[in-house]
Structures are given as C-alpha cells and as structure tokens.
Amino acid sequence: MKIDGTPYRSVWLDPEDGWSVHIIDQTRLPWSLDVLRLTTAAEAAHAIRVMQVRGAPLIGAVAAYGLCLALRADAGTEVMEREAAMLAATRPTAVNLRWALERMLTRLRNTAPDARVAAAYDEASRIADEDVAQCEAIGRHGVGLIEQAAARRGSGPVHVLTHCNAGWLATVDWGTALAPIYLAHERGVAVHVWVDETRPRNQGAALTAWELGRHGVAHTIVADNAGGHLMQHGQVDLAIVGTDRVTRTGDVANKIGTYLKALAARDNGVPFWVALPSSTIDWRLRDGVAEIPIEERNAAEVTHATGRTADGTLATVQITAPGSAAANPAFDVTPARLVSGFITERGRCEASEAGLLSLFPEHR
Ligand code: MRU
C-alpha cells in the first residue's frame, strides 16, 4: 500500500546488504515514520514482544526472518531449535507466529547446516510474498460485499466498521479486513470507514486511521463504545474485522472488544465478516473460548496513555486513579454463530467447520 503515493511493505530486506531486516516501528505511529533495522533474532523477538511489529500475519513473517538472523550467527540444529522456540514464545494468541516458525523448521530440519541460511531466507521470503498474494486475494473476494452494500444503499458512501488494525501494517501488504476496502476505493466505490479507537493500545486510532489516511480513504475514528449506537441508527452497512486465530469450527479470536461488536451487529442485523489468510486457522482446535490462549498484557497499557502535546513532544500520562488495579486481556473470542462469514484467499464461506472445509478440503 502507499504512504503519500510511495509503495511500502511492512517488512523488507535491506536492498544493499540483502540480509538485515527492515520494519516500520509501529509504536511510533502515527507521529513519525521510523524504520528500524533488525540484525539479530533477539532484536526480532523484542520487536514482536513490544509490538514494534504486530498483527497476526506480520508477526509470523518477522519471526521467520528472525530465524534467518539466528542462523546467520549459528546454523547448528541446537541453536536453530532454541531460537525458534524463543521467537514462538514472544506472543501467545496469533497462531500465524507458530505456523510460520513450524513451516521454517520443517524445511530447515531437512537442510544441511551449511545450506540453511540460504534456505531460511528463501522460505521467509516465500512466506512474506505468499502473504501479500493471499491478502490481495482476500481483497478480491471481499470487495463484492462492499459493492453489494453500495447497491443496497443507493446513494452516499458505504459505511464499514472495523476494529483494531487489520490493514497492511498488520500483514506484509494489503491487510486482511482492509484489503476489500482498499480495492473498493481503487475501483471508485465511495467507502467510509468507522475506525474503532481500540483501547488500550489504540491500534485503530493510531494505525488504521493513519494508513487509511495516507492512502486517501475516508474514515472517522470513534470511541470503542460507539459501534452499537451507530448500528442502531443505520450508520453501519457492514463490519469487517481481522483475526489472530480461528478454530476449525469457526470461532474467532481477535482484539479485545471484537466480541461486543459482533453482539451489537447481530442485534441490529448488520453483517459481521471476518477476513483471514488460511495461516490464521488453527485446525487443531474446536472450542475457541476454552482453547485459544488469550494474551494478558501489562496493566500499564490500561492505566497510561501516550500522545502528542501541543508543542509536538510525545508524553505518557496516567489516566486512572492512583492505586487502582487494572487488568488487560488483549483478545477475546467471538463464537462462530455471531459471524456472517469468512473472507479467505480461496473465497468466502460460512463460519463453520463445513464452511472452512469447503474451501480447504485438504484439512478434512
Ligand atoms: O495486538 P495486535 O495489535 O497484534 O492485534 C492485532 C489484531 O487483533 C488484528 O485484528 C489481527 O492480528 C488481524 S491482522 C490482519
């Protein structure tokens, strides 16, 4: 996608040395566009842990490149297994992280140590390139939903509500939930996005709004609690969100607050779609609420907020009563019954085991 007309990906190799890894520091957005250069697996793990990179597909791709960096230092089997486990432990909920590392290890365990670095970069680049192709396909399979909503509406823009950031910053390019929106925009369909601010880390207000704005897509940031009201008043044509893990039965883990939006959408007859690449499906799990591990993050993300003051400096301030405890579950699970359907790289389907298997019969 473009930043003020210049195409970017969210992770790329240094064009000069061909091995170090560049990322956009997402903790600095929307205030400044800082590119970081990662040279070790420990730096890649740190970037994932502190959310300089975040979003399920992107953390998978960065972990894959992190393993490449580990192998440059030592391509032996013991180090490879240890560093892969270290990278896998950085964040628990998004299954793409484990998927990408398992894919890397499957190839590398069958590769002689002296050929591992080249094989690792080849596999990591495939993971990144496939993610771009899959997200573009998600756009193609999802854009019809926006075009149909435009036809139903008759006049004025289609209003799409989204939660968190499932745009190009959360993937390698295009995004999942935002890919159909970008494609609709490219096709000239008038589209306006309601952007949930997504407390406590504000991925909507800081990241989704930034990338939509830089690409020229109309949008409005709303407080997380506004969605139900907007739906009651006919101001949301459809909701599209991303996901960090989907069970084979269609339960959806995504950023905390997604479940409440799905409940409000059901109560108001608003279609609620989930966009995902197949790397986000955990075929081993059946019951999302019981089985998907939910990341519990630092309470300081709830008690404090960072912003820019009038003189342009960044400041972190406490926004809670001193001494009050805070809890910070970072994801929730939306049961499949509340999801209108999935948008995947192979097409759209019902949010159920039968629906997923109709598109991915190899997992029967
Ligand atoms: O904690 P984050 O910012 O990594 O959470 C991201 C989300 O919840 C996204 O919606 C999800 O990863 C899908 S990204 C295409």
Image (cartoon, rainbow, N blue to C red):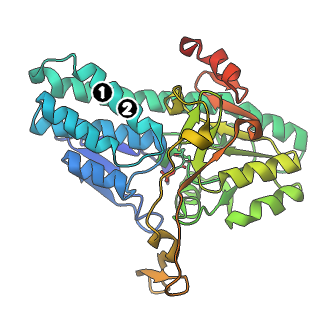
The amino acid beneath tag 1 is: Met
Is residue 24 at least partly visible in the picture?
no
179 to 282, vertically: above or below: below
Residue at mark 1: 104
Instruction: Tell me where residue 84 appears, x and y as whole percent.
Output: 26, 37
38 displayed left or right of 314: left
Residue at image point 61% right, 28% down? 344
The front one of 128 and 109 is 109
What x and y, as percent, mark residue 233? 89, 59
Q: Give the residue at the far front of this rendering.
A: 290
Q: Quadrant of the C terminus?
A: top right
For the residue pair 206 and 68, the one nearer the viewer reads as 68
Instruction: State the residue at coordinates (31%, 35%).
Output: 64
Q: Residue at x 24, y 52 (%)?
A: 43
Estimate how packed mark 2 is, as few (under 14), some (14 to 19) or many (20 or more) residues with alpha carbons within 10 Å.
many
Q: Secondary structure at mark 2?
A: helix
Label 1 environment density (alpha carbons within 10 Å; few <14, some 14–19, many ≥20): many
Q: Amino acid at mark 2?
A: Ala
Residue at x 47% of width, y 83% of height: 317
Asked if residue 95 is positioned above or below residue 108 in the image, the reply reads below
Percent x, y for residue 231? 84, 55
Q: Position of residue 101 (x, y in %)?
A: 33, 32
